[in-house]
Amino acid sequence: MSTPLYQLKAEFFKTLGHPVRIRVLELLSQREHGVAEMLRDTGVEPAYLSQQLAVLRRASMVVARREGTAVYYALTSPQVAELLVIARTVLSGVLAGQAELLADLRAAAPREKTP
């Protein structure tokens, strides 16, 4: 029996469910990056970055190549970058809606009386 698609999607989104992994994918959406660059840009310890890159490799979201002693990473699919853009768009809409709600709540709040 094969795994249902909704379960595969849940696993996919679980892979995305970590701030460092999202940051790495954002960096790689721009271009290929070396590990040293990603360490600088993420501000995490080397072992921690290595763990997060391993998760992304196992999920086939990134691919590594070695050049001498340096290791470079790239996205396996440009659609990952598109997904991040779509997520930003959705979040922008949600946050805009929340800002409007907050403004409405503040406008409707009774004014406190000063003694």
Image (cartoon, rainbow, N blue to C red):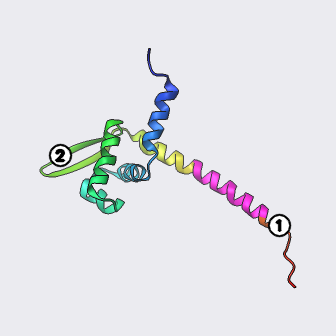
Please provide percent x and percent y for residue 18: 44, 49
The stretch drawn in magenta includes residue 107: no
SS state under label 1: loop
Q: Main secondary structure of the magenta part?
A: helix
Q: Hey, which quadrant is residue 111 in on the image?
A: bottom right
The residue at 59%/48% (across/down) is 90
Q: Quadrant of the N terminus?
A: top left
Q: Nearer the viewer, residue 76 or 110?
A: 110
SS state under label 2: strand
Amino acid carrying label 2: it is: Arg
Amino acid carrying label 1: it is: Ala
The residue at 78%/62% (across/down) is 105
State the residue lying farthest toward the left: 68
Q: Give the answer, above or below, for where 103 lies relative to 88.
A: below
Category of crowding for the residue at label 1, using alpha-carbon neighbours closer than 10 angstroms: few (below 14), some (14–19), many (at least 20) = few
Q: Which residue is mark 2?
A: 66
- For the record, the magenta segment spans 90-105
The stretch drawn in magenta includes residue 93: yes
The residue at 33%/59% (across/down) is 44
Q: CA distance from mark 1 to mark 2?
A: 60 Å
The residue at 39%/41% (across/down) is 78
Q: Which residue is mark 1?
A: 109
